[in-house]
Image (cartoon, coloured by chain):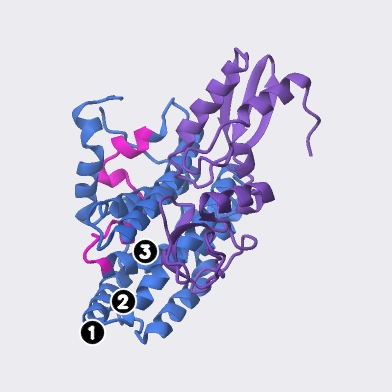
Amino acid sequence: MTTLTLTAPSPHLAFLLRLADDNLILGHRLSEWTGHAPMLEEDIALANIALDHIGAARSLYDRAAELHGEGLTEDDYAYRRDARGYLNCLLVERPNGDFAHTIVRQLLYSAFALPYWAVLTASTDATIAAIAAKSEKEARYHVRHSGDWFLRLGDGTDESRTRTEAALAALWPYTGELFEVDATLEPLIAEGVAADPRSVHAVWQQTIDQALAATGLTVPEVPFMQTGGRTGYHTEHLGFILADLQFMQRAYPGATW
Amino acid sequence: MVSARTPAEERAWRAAATVMDPEVPVLTIEDLGVLREVREEAGTIVATITPTYSGCPAMDLISVQVEVALRDAGFQDVKVKRVLSPAWTTDWLSEEGRQKLRTYGIAPPAGAAGRGALFGEPAVACPHCGSTHTTKVSEFGSTACKALYRCESCREPFDYFKCH
């Protein structure tokens, strides 16, 4: 199947794809734990959270396809774009690493997603508002799940604490991108289609501080924040995710079952 | 909220409302609040359903079963539509539905859907012995809408239908 390349997508379309790609890639990452999680209950929990993210992504791709026209479907966005066409933030494509990495990544993202979905319920795009109202409820449980584990790992054994601290240090440089506002977002915020991610920074910080305080861990010092995902510049990891995710449609174009 | 159903719509609603939730087979999709509306639009019966969770894998099966139920009831031209808004909430679970859950061994949602997230738990009563001396084993149980608990009094594990 030919590659879908979007030349200069409208800000509205780009915003939908950014949100959708965050959810698809994070959902895909979490699904990689299926059959490998530290215990059965966690295997099921991570698969369920993955389903929530992929469900949100599907609804957003549907809306994107509707806006886009040209007879595209959700599958075209997921299966036919190359890494340069993906607009997810870099945090969600970071490898699962050990269980601490997965939990810290989830907490950092979900603590942002929860208040961001909440403000998006006021979007002037009624479909985005509806998806946001649904996803906000789900994100609440994602914060709770990762927050509980963050406490158990961060305040657990020396080993689990060391690993949690290492995960925090490795992933913290990817949190700045969550709050970036660029020329794509600015007009949409003004129109009320998108919400300003900076408006939820304080709530995000408060959730993270509360989780850190419960474990005695601190915010790592980082020299700079990573960026690039929102304009399609990714880490080397995204290509491997897509090779896995897109294999069937690339090898057998249009295959259905 | 909406105009009264016509006799045909009423009959179609009753047919669609017999569909059981595939994951919680003691509740109908009406008990759950998944079935939102059944209307006749230009000769087509349109049943509207809403997912409990965005990624709920049961939605495809429910759609097919609603379609089959409507055809079995004699409707030829049927369509199943999915909506996301208003977002499904456990507040829509009827008292009868809650009692059915308890009898089936699933603890119904404790209280109304709230907005709290980090660190905070409701008291969940064991559906087998009624004790509130229970421990959460996992935030997600056999499906996304449930958490896994263990009763410390009767030692039985059970699913808890989370507030949503």
Q: CA distance from mark 3 to mark 2?
A: 14 Å
Instruction: Mark 3 vs mark 2: tell me if same chain.
Output: yes
The foreground one among B73 and A173 is B73
Viewer can see residue A170: yes
Judging from the image, mark 1 belongs to the subunit labelled: A
Amino acid marked by disc 1: Asp
Q: Is residue B8 left or right of residue B101?
A: right
Q: Regarding mark 2 in the picture, which secondary structure is present there?
A: helix
Q: Residue at x 33, y 69 (%)?
A: A104
Magenta residues (range): A75-99
- Circle 1 sits on which residue? A158
Chain holding disc 3: A
Which residue in the protein does label 2 denote?
A153
Label the blue chain with its letter. A
- At label 2, the amino acid type is Leu
Residue nearer the viewer, A64 or B97: B97
Q: Residue at x 58, y 17 (%)?
A: B72
Residue at left 27%, top 51%?
Answer: A34
Do dots 2 and 1 share one subunit?
Answer: yes
Mark 2 Cα within 10 Å, few/some/many (few <14, many 20+)?
many
Where residue B48 appears, x then y in whole percent?
61, 32
